[in-house]
């Protein structure tokens, strides 16, 4: 099939690739329920037209990212089924003197959990607690659920396993778990403040906004029923995943063992995540004799997102192979005319606006290679652009009810409870919250990383 691309010529191939990508992206926006099939179909067309050779397809897919997402999803499902998160939420409620503090604590708890657990899963396990409190006090659960949702989205950018976009960034920039805390770019002499700490400052600023919004909600609350943890093994597995990812961060990419020279696998993080999930499967299958929970984890795996990413990786690989990514990156560099602050500002705020209406997974996956080209063309460290991209794209999803999957999940829970939430009601909380967080993140990323 490569002969098709050869007959079209380099320039024509680039335009065909760009046109096909534009049609694909439009399809992803319009037909959200068929995104995985659209991405896979586009990937097939890229191969059939010779835009990317068939032999390069396996290499275009970032298997480390795919395995990390799959393994983490399985472990998180076990964690939720153990009822440990609900037990932790009970403890927070006991420490809350009134509704305002309960909502604040639940949003903070959602943020903390979401730094290590998928955002949607976080909302699904914490939102019912807020609904229960609202029913007891006979108040609307809408504001509390919105606060939980947007807090979980914000903290998703804090760690390598917090969100799919973080995993994508780690794959593109070759970041390990500790790099999100303290990062030293290739060639740099010293470590710098990682994205985790910047997100925490932004989180504090955004939480301050919630104190203002919920300042009048002072109804006292009392916890009557308490959750019981079914099994502590999933908690150990989740902690084991985090600790293992930290430990493997210290292993060099190449090391000697006696007379042997060993190389750390490129997909080591993914292997760890899947391996620990499989330990959980063996635990419940052989020790607990509970095959039902294993089937639940397999059912809850987000195959749709995994297929979407696999297709997108091939499409983006085709854009890189055809030269489209290079041309787009160089165009951005020309627009900036050597002004690093200008291109950084455009990237952050454009990403935030786009992500308010479009799923940030395909957007971030597309922009990461473009950012690499921009940084090379302008001679600046990619770190400031990488972190700016992730900050804008992750936080931007909080602006609107459709900007993030967690928001959609939260509104779905409210709909089942008989509450139809209008965009205006959602954005009354989400907009000031997001702007506070994004302004802080925007400023701090530039302050810490513009000179790297």
Image (cartoon, grey):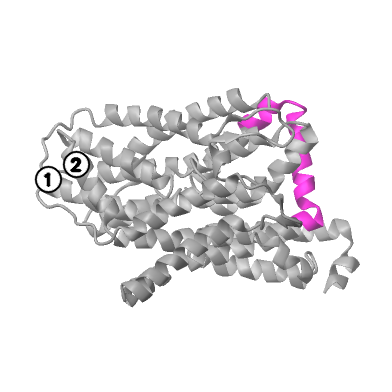
The vertical placement of 301 against 413, above or below, is below
Residue stretch in magenta: 320-345
Residue 356 place in picture, x, y as percent: 48, 44
Residue 95 versus residue 241: which sits nearer the camera?
241
The vertical placement of 109 against 74, above or below, is above
Q: Residues within 10 Å of mark 1 (few under 14, many from 20)?
A: some
Dominant secondary structure of the residues highlighted in magenta in the image: helix
Q: Element at badge 2?
A: helix
Residue 306 versus residue 138: which sits nearer the camera?
306
Residue at 26% x, 42% y: name it: 144
Residue 252 place in picture, x, y as percent: 67, 47
Mark 2 sits on what residue?
93
Mark 1 sits on what residue?
223
Residue 26 place in picture, x, y as percent: 60, 58
Residue 300 versus residue 134: which sits nearer the camera?
300
* 402 sits to left or right of 335: left
Residue 34 versus residue 199: which sits nearer the camera?
199
- Kindly check if marks 2 and 1 are in contact, taking CB atoms under 8 A apart as contact: yes
Q: Quadrant of the N terminus?
A: bottom right
Q: Quadrant of residue 179?
A: top right
Can you tell which mark lies on residue 1? none
Q: Quadrant of the C terminus?
A: top right
Residue 165 in sight here: no
The vertical placement of 403 against 105, above or below, is below
Residue 57 place in picture, x, y as percent: 72, 67
Q: Quadrant of residue 445?
A: top right
Residue at 63% x, 58% y: name it: 267
Q: Count the marks: how many?
A: 2
Q: Quadrant of residue 430?
A: top left
Q: Is residue 338 magenta?
A: yes
């Amino acid at each position: 099939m490569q002969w098709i691309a050869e007959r079209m010529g380099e320039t024509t191939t680039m335009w065909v690739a760009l046109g096909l990508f534009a049609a694909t992206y439009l399809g992803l926006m319009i037909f959200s329920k068929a995104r995985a099939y659209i991405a896979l179909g586009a990937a097939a067309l890229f191969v059939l037209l010779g835009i990317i050779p068939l032999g390069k397809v396996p290499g275009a897919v970032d298997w480390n990212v795919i395995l990390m997402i799959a393994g983490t999803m399985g472990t998180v499902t076990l964690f939720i089924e153990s009822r440990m998160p609900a037990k932790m939420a009970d403890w927070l409620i006991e420490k809350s003197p009134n509704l305002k503090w309960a909502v604040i604590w639940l949003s903070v708890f959602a943020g903390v959990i979401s730094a290590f657990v998928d955002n949607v899963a976080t909302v699904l396990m914490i939102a019912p607690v807020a609904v229960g409190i609202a029913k007891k006090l006979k108040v609307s659960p809408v504001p509390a659920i919105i606060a939980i949702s947007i807090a979980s989205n914000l903290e998703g950018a804090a760690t390598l396993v917090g969100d799919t976009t973080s995993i994508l960034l780690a794959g593109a920039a070759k970041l390990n778990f500790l790099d999100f805390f303290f990062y030293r770019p290739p060639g740099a002499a010293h470590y710098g403040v990682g994205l985790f700490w910047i997100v925490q400052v932004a989180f504090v600023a955004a939480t301050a906004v919630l104190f203002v919004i919920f300042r009048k909600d002072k109804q006292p609350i009392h916890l009557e029923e308490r959750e019981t943890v079914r099994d502590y093994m999933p908690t150990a597995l989740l902690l084991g995943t985090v600790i293992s990812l930290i430990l493997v961060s210290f292993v060099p990419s190449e090391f000697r063992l006696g007379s042997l020279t060993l190389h750390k696998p490129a997909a080591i993080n993914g292997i760890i995540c899947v391996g620990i999930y499989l330990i959980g499967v063996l635990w419940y299958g052989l020790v607990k004799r509970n095959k039902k929970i294993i089937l639940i984890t397999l059912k809850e795996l987000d195959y749709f997102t995994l297929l979407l990413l696999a297709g997108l990786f091939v499409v983006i690989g085709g854009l890189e192979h055809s030269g489209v990514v290079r041309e787009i990156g160089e165009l951005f560099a020309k627009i900036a005319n050597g002004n690093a602050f200008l291109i950084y500002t455009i990237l952050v705020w454009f990403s935030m606006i786009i992500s308010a209406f479009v799923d940030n997974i395909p957007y971030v996956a597309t922009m990461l290679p473009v950012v690499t080209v921009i940084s090379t063309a302008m001679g600046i460290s990619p770190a400031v652009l990488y972190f700016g991209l992730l900050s804008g794209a992750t936080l931007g999803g909080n602006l609107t009810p459709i900007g993030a999957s967690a928001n959609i999940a939260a509104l779905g829970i409210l709909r089942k409870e008989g509450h139809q939430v209008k965009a205006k009601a959602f954005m009354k909380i989400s907009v000031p919250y997001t702007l506070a967080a994004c302004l802080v993140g925007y400023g701090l990323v530039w302050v810490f990383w513009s000179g790297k």
